[in-house]
Amino acid sequence: MTGAKVGATVIATPESVLPAGESHYAYVSAANTIQIVLVNATAAPINNLGQKWYV
């Protein structure tokens, strides 16, 4: 994302509701680069590859 700076606040919102047991966080990992990390708190696999995000 152009203009993203390390240490800046990032708010990432999924376009649709995440599956039960899944959460996320986002951060600027390098200049102009945002990482969105998905956390699966269940024992089951979750496929969210098509998820769109608002950042």
Image (cartoon, rainbow, N blue to C red):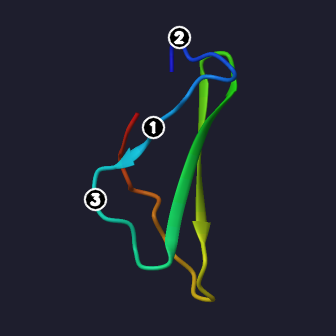
| Residue 34 x/y as whole percent | 59, 31
Q: Quadrant for residue 55, please give it.
A: top left
Residue at the spot of label 1: 11
**Residue 16: mark:** 3
**Residue 47: mark:** none
Neighbours of disc 3 within 10 Å: few (<14), some (14-19), many (20+): few
Decide which of tag 2 and tag 1 comes sooner along the chain. Answer: 2
Neighbours of disc 2 within 10 Å: few (<14), some (14-19), many (20+): few
Neighbours of disc 1 within 10 Å: few (<14), some (14-19), many (20+): few
Q: Quadrant for residue 26, please give it.
A: top right
| Viewer-nearest of discs 3 and 1 | 1
- Relative placement, left or right, of 15 versus 1 is left
| Residue 30 x/y as whole percent | 71, 22
Residue with the most extreme left position: 16
Spatial CA span between label 2 and label 1: 14 Å
Residue at the spot of label 2: 3
Q: How many marks?
A: 3
| Viewer-nearest of discs 2 and 1 | 1
- Relative placement, left or right, of 20 versus 30 is left
Q: Amino acid at mark 3?
A: Ser
Seen at 62% across and 36% down, the residue is 27
Using the image, determine if residue 23 lies above or below residue 1: below
Decide which of tag 3 and tag 2 comes sooner along the chain. Answer: 2
Seen at 47% across and 58% down, the residue is 49
Seen at 56% across and 17% down, the residue is 4
